[in-house]
Image (spheres, rainbow, N blue to C red):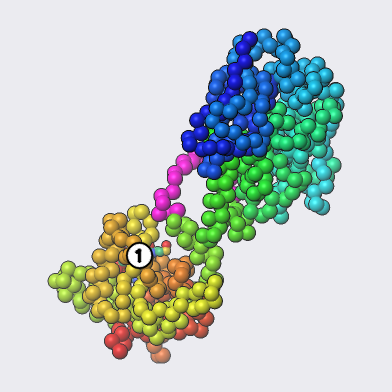
Amino acid sequence: MSEQEIKVPDLGGADEVEIIELLVSAGDSVEEEDPILTIETDKASVELPSPGAGKITKLTVKVGDKVKEGDVVGMMEASGEADESDSSGDSDGSENEPEEKAEDAPKAESKAEDSKPAPKKKSGGSRKETVLVPPLDGMENVPVIEINVSEGDTIEADDALVTVESDKATMEIPSPYGGKVAKILVSEGDKLSEGDKLLELTVVEDGDDEDEDQGEPPADSGEQAKPESKADAAPQKEPATQPQGSTYEPPSPGAKVHAGPAVRKLARELGADMTRIKGSGPKSRILKDDVQTYVKSQLQQSQQGGSVGTGAGIPGVKLPDFSQFGNVEREAMSRMMAVTATNMQRSWLNVPHVTQFEDADITDMEVFRKSQKAAGEKKGVKMTPLPFILKACATALAELPQFNVSLDMERKEVVRKQYIHIGIAVDTPNGLMVPVIRDVDQKGLWELAAESAELAQKARDKQLKPAEMQGACFTITSLGGIGGTAFTPIVNTPEVAILGVSKAAMKPVWDGSDFQPRLMLPLSLSYDHRAVNGADAARFTSLLSQLMGDIRTLLL
Ligand code: CAO
């Protein structure tokens, strides 16, 4: 039988690298390319693969050691030879575990005299323990939302057994002992109270617990660290019944975590839910980098206003398994939809919104607008109500400049704008876009009609340049061409107000002695109540109504 050295391969230019995780123990059988240990350079964590299939006979390094290309980290026997060595009493027998797995308790017991056994394989006997539900912080009848272990799993003390969820918090119930899960006595959906029976555990009594707690990876026996082993699939350890807080997002159903102990420890320290992390290692193993990337992305999201459940302190929206109600299809969001969703949520969460409603009598405006139809055809420009609304808003913004501001909450300053640029929301097949018309106060109706039509077309053709979508002081969103009587638009931050326009309709209006049929245009002004008070909002919409009620005033 020949032993083979396991050496550090080419490190791509890196000098000395640190071992951050041992993924196998002496005695473990490995396949070619199976990860042996994890090393960390200043750029990335890398798993060192096994040079061939066989059995690890010795590891000559420990976590924290620094190694370089060509260093020997351990020894292994090639497949075939390894089997013979099991019965031959190899000189390295102290570290040389037989191929049986931790589940195979009786065989493991026969190795009790080994000088350095893997804890779960050496045993002085075993006993059955029924694990009961511990005190649940005063809560009763708390539903089980997830069972974190399966029958046959080998677990450690403090490993999460089940996850329960009250209306206040989600908590994991930890195992009081290490051992093998013999029988699970609860199902998802069951309601648990203190003292209820949770599961039966076969506890191995070997007095070697301190080995298990020492250092991280080797003591776990290769069984746990090996890809796809059952113990490996066990959930991350959490402190006893620690609530995960209201931002808990449910893991994907049936999610199994596949990571080594050091990575699990890092995730625990950073509070990262490993069931939500995508592993980039072999067989989707979660690496240290994956945890760091995940935490970074979560932080970025919460700094950008946060998607729900990512740090804004708002409970995440839990999705049911829709397929239980009927067939479903999933489709990735377009980038534009994702960006719009983030922007909408940011505005909605940051801005205290109020909406002021008003009807403007546009009967006379419509007569004038229609009278311009022939002129419009000559110019090749269609005069819709939008240019009048733009002009009225520009006048109102000039008269009530508190609407033409942005708030700098960090510096506690109000930014007053000396220009009047207005965004128009355009409905496109790809989603909502908001091109900006500059200096609206300085432009005539025809110019505004032409420019808004041109920008709307560009938006639909995906031809808008970034500069054409920036710099607005205020936004108009018109659903008048479609329908509806009123709506509550969301302020396009950092602007502080937005005008929603609905479909004009003939209404009976009391003139003091009679009802007159008048064409009424519904206006909905949403505003940031930090910047604008309600009285000013009512002044703004009244002014709009006056300006559009008598468009001659737009000239004043
Ligand atoms: N009341 C009644 N009729 C109206 C109207 C109103 N408030 N506004 C427009 N109309 C009429 C127009 O006069 C035109 O009719 P005619 O062809 O008979 O003249 C017709 O509706 C269509 O107008 P339009 O939509 O082509 O032009 P517009 O200038 O009014 O609007 C634009 C341009 C870009 C704002 C619009 O096309 C659009 O995309 N609107 C949707 C915006 C949107 O999605 N907002 C939601 C944001 S929040 O999700």
Q: Which residues are magenta?
A: 318-338
Residue 337 included in the magenta stretch of the image:
yes
Question: Which residue is found at the position 51% from the left and 38% from the top?
Answer: 14
Image quadrant containing the N terminus: top right
State how many labels appear. Answer: 1
**Residue 492 falls left or right of residue 138:** left
Residue, far left: 378
* Rendering quadrant holding ligand 1: bottom left
Other-residue count near label 1 (Cα within 10 Å), few / some / many at <14 / 14–19 / ≥20:
some
Query: Main SS type for the magenta part?
Result: loop
Q: Nearer the viewer, residue 44 or 317?
A: 44
Image coords of residue 382 (percent x, y): 22, 69
Left or right side of 174 for 316: left
Q: Judge by depth and name the residue closer to the eye, 335 or 364.
A: 335
Q: Is residue 519 visible?
A: no
* Residue 379 relative to residue 262: left or right: left
Mark 1: which amino acid? Met
Q: Secondary structure at mark 1?
A: helix
Q: Is residue 287 above or below residue 429?
A: above
User: In the image, residue 72 lies at what x, y percent?
Assistant: 60, 26
